């Protein structure tokens, strides 16, 4: 009876946050999700290789806080032209119910947005790029290049409602780019990393 009540509460909580079961998800399904989304399909899209987990566990074994945060499923990481992290947004710092408050404290009122999480030199753009895998059926006209500002957005279908709120906020925030610095947005699906790593 107690177990039933706990599971019922858990299911209700997941439903309120918009959590989906993604244990069956594969690359073709993720491509279909991207192709039907007006924002995602306009940008570069990759998925995160499951080896990223092993990299983080070995590289940040002495710093649990960075390890914990860098493996979160939803993030927006802003890097300058040298690959240095200049702003970092992740789900466990957002808070909020039934939707995460990505703009808590109006951090997205400026461009680049203010970082709610303390920054670290341990994470660079090159920490992520080797683990980005292309979807075979998606082609991009823009070649990989160093931009004045690169925004990497981790998103997933398991928390798609919350991910979409972050994605839309990042895109809206770009309109505040007063000096018109060229920005490159890379959308990275994290579902496949977790599904494959768990197998």
Image (spheres, grey):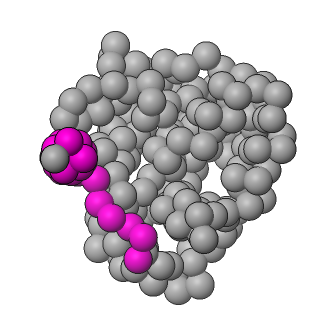
Position above or below: 60 against 142: above
Residue farthest toward the front in the current orientation of the protein: 1
On the image, the x and y values in percent for residue 73 come to 49, 47
Q: Is 5 a magenta residue?
A: yes
On the image, the x and y values in percent for residue 179 come to 52, 29
Residue at point 38% right, 67% down? Answer: 22
Say whether residue 43 is left or right of residue 123: left
Residue at point 41% right, 77% down? Answer: 24
Q: Is 101 a magenta residue?
A: no
Most common SS among magenta residues: helix
Say whether residue 58 is left or right of residue 138: right
When asked about the image quadrant of residue 100, the answer is top left
Q: Nearer the viewer, residue 101 or 108?
A: 101
Q: Can the viewer see residue 53 in this picture?
A: yes
When asked about the image quadrant of residue 21, the answer is bottom left
Residue at point 35% right, 30% down? Answer: 102
Q: Can the viewer see residue 39 in this picture?
A: no
Q: Nearer the viewer, residue 157 or 45?
A: 157
Region of the chain picked out in magenta, as a range? 2-24
On the image, the x and y values in percent for residue 23 come to 42, 70
Position above or below: 179 against 51: above
How many labels, in total? Answer: 0
Q: Nearer the viewer, residue 190 or 35?
A: 190
Q: Nearer the viewer, residue 187 or 26?
A: 26
On the image, the x and y values in percent for residue 195 come to 53, 66
């Amino acid at each position: 009876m107690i177990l039933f009540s706990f599971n019922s509460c858990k299911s209700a909580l997941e439903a309120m946050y918009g959590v989906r079961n993604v244990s069956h998800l594969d690359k073709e399904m993720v491509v279909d999700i991207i192709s039907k989304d007006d924002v995602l399909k306009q940008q570069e899209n990759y998925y995160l290789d499951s080896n990223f987990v092993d990299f983080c566990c070995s590289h940040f074994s002495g710093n649990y806080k960075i390890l914990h945060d860098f493996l979160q499923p939803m993030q927006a990481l802003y890097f300058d032209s040298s690959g240095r992290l200049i702003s970092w947004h992740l789900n466990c710092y957002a808070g909020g119910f039934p939707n995460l408050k990505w703009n808590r404290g109006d951090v997205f009122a400026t461009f680049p947005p203010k970082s709610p999480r303390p920054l670290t030199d341990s994470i660079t753009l090159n920490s992520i790029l080797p683990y980005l895998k292309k979807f075979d059926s998606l082609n991009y006209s823009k070649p990989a290049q160093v931009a004045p500002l690169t925004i990497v957005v981790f998103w997933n279908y398991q928390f798609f409602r919350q991910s979409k709120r972050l994605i839309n906020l990042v895109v809206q925030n770009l309109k505040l780019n007063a000096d018109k610095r060229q920005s490159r947005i890379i959308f990275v699906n994290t579902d496949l990393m977790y599904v494959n790593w768990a197998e």
